[in-house]
Amino acid sequence: MIAVVLLSTVLVKAQDNSNRIGVGLGGFYRPAASATLFWEHETHYHNAWEFFAEGRVLFPDDLSQVSWLWDSSGKQWGVGAAWKPCLYRARNRYGSARIGVSLGAAPSDFLAGIHAGWQHSYALRRGWQFYWQAGVDVMLPKRGDLFRVGAGVGIKMPVRIR
């Protein structure tokens, strides 16, 4: 009986309030590629806040022209935040909706974005995680690039704050 009482009073934490730094690569329906660097703070039950910086390169229709690599007209960047409520949990994996906003710039335009999608994470050893995500971004005020549909993969590594 004493053992049961002692075990029931011990505070159990399953990755609550943990922090991770992550990096991801993605592609979009309109030929483009992106790289994302983010910091994630996980709260209770795998719900999380994410703060990110993203760079994006638009591919031209004619890839044989090498000048697009250093031409700044197809490059965009942005910073933002996303709320990721956990909607699915299983052993060593969980899925979260990803709802966020961002601000950024292209060489001649200001960009604002609303992001919605799904992120599925898999627990690896020592707190590392692998994830894939898919979603749609609504970018304003650019009408030619209003909807961005894409997917990406990445890795999250734990940050130990002592």
Image: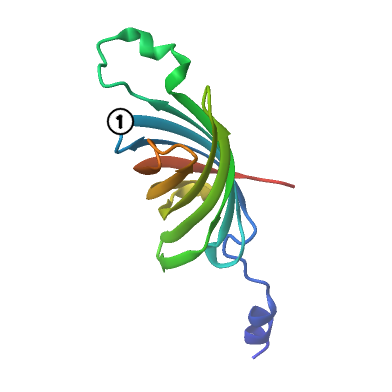
Task: Name the kind of residue labelled 1 in the image.
Answer: Pro
> Would you name the residue on which mark 1 appears?
31
Horizontally, residue 4 falls left or right of residue 125, namely right
| Residue 148 coordinates in the image, percent (x, y) | 37, 42
Residue positioned 25% across, 11% down in the render: 64
Residue 46 point in image, percent of width and height: 53, 62
Q: Is residue 162 visible?
A: yes
Is residue 16 shown left or right of residue 60? right
The vertical placement of 31 against 73, above or below, is below
Reply above or below: 18 against 37.
Answer: below
Measuring from the top left, give residue 117's x and y in whole percent. 41, 54
Q: Number of callouts in the render?
A: 1
Q: Quadrant of the N terminus?
A: bottom right
Which residue is nearer to you in this view: 2 or 9? 9
Pointer 1 local density, CA inside 10 Å: few below 14, some 14–19, many at least 20: few
Q: Residue at x 47, y 55 (%)?
A: 98
For the point 42% across and 22% down, the residue is 74
For the rendered model, the colour scheme is: rainbow
Q: Secondary structure at mark 1?
A: loop
Q: Nearer the viewer, residue 68 or 98?
A: 68
Q: Residue at x 43, y 13 (%)?
A: 71
